[in-house]
Amino acid sequence: MLDLPYVNAFNAHIEILALSKTFFDIGRQDVLKGSFGENGYDGDFYADIFFEGMEQAAEFVYADYIEEWEVDKWFVADEAMTRFYKLCKELSRLHGIPFHDNPYVIKAEQFVRETLTFYSGGLDIRFYTGTRHKYASSFVIYIYPEFYANLELIQGLVKVFHFYKTEAVSLQAELYGERMAA
């Protein structure tokens, strides 16, 4: 018979390794020195890992629980996403093309759709491309009780925000002929 605490600890370590690899792959070694599993995990280790991972996925993360819907609501934003869409608007204006026909916007929408699509019910993601303030471009994520792809969601968000950082550099180079620090 399997010892449940041992299995839970093993599962927690596997999730920590998976998240650590995701952050390592995009050059975010600072996260690896951080708090994943630092204090151990009790019976809520999946919740602990999820909260730690979400907090590291973007520059700004705000969580709330909507009791009447029984849903977790997450606001997740990164300045690189807003910078990317500001540059897209500038490129659209310079070339006289509608914002939604901009090839960078289309590429970003496809990448986000492919990366944040899961075979799990219970997830609703709202996507915003505003540029009026630092975190105007963002995701509002509603997570219902039946959603079970928490690790994949964090990994997807990390990849999406890394995409925005690297694409903003490419777009900056196209617009101004210079490389911009990521």
Image (cartoon, rainbow, N blue to C red):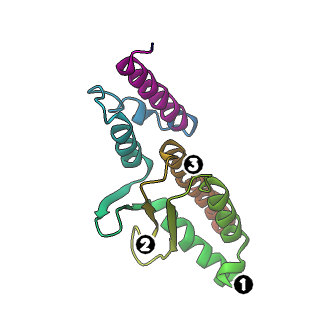
The dot on residue 136 is 2
Can you name the residue that lies furthest to the top here?
1
Observer-nearest residue: 62 or 93? 62
- The span shown in magenta is 2-22
Disc 1 is placed on an element classified as loop
Amino acid type at mark 1:
Ile
Around disc 2, counting alpha carbons within 10 Å, would you say few (fewer than 14), some (14 to 19), or many (20 or more)?
Answer: some
Amino acid type at mark 2:
Ala
Around disc 3, counting alpha carbons within 10 Å, would you say few (fewer than 14), some (14 to 19), or many (20 or more)?
Answer: many
Does the magenta run of residues contain 160? no
Does the magenta run of residues contain 4? yes
Q: Which residue is mark 3?
A: 159
Whether the residues at callouts 2 and 3 have beta carbons within 8 Å, the answer is no
Q: Residue at x 60, y 57 (%)?
A: 169
Of the residues under marks 2 and 3, which one precedes in the sequence?
Answer: 2
Depth check, mark 1 against mark 3: the one in front is 3
Q: Name above or below for residue 158 compared with residue 136.
A: above
Q: Which residue is mark 1?
A: 97
Q: Considering the image in quadrants, where does the N terminus appear?
A: top left
Q: Give the percent coordinates (x, y) of residue 111.
A: 66, 58
Q: Name above or below for residue 97 compared with residue 103.
A: below
Around disc 1, counting alpha carbons within 10 Å, would you say few (fewer than 14), some (14 to 19), or many (20 or more)?
Answer: few
Q: Give the percent coordinates (x, y) of residue 116.
A: 59, 56
Q: Quadrant of residue 114?
A: bottom right
Of the residues under marks 2 and 1, which one precedes in the sequence?
Answer: 1
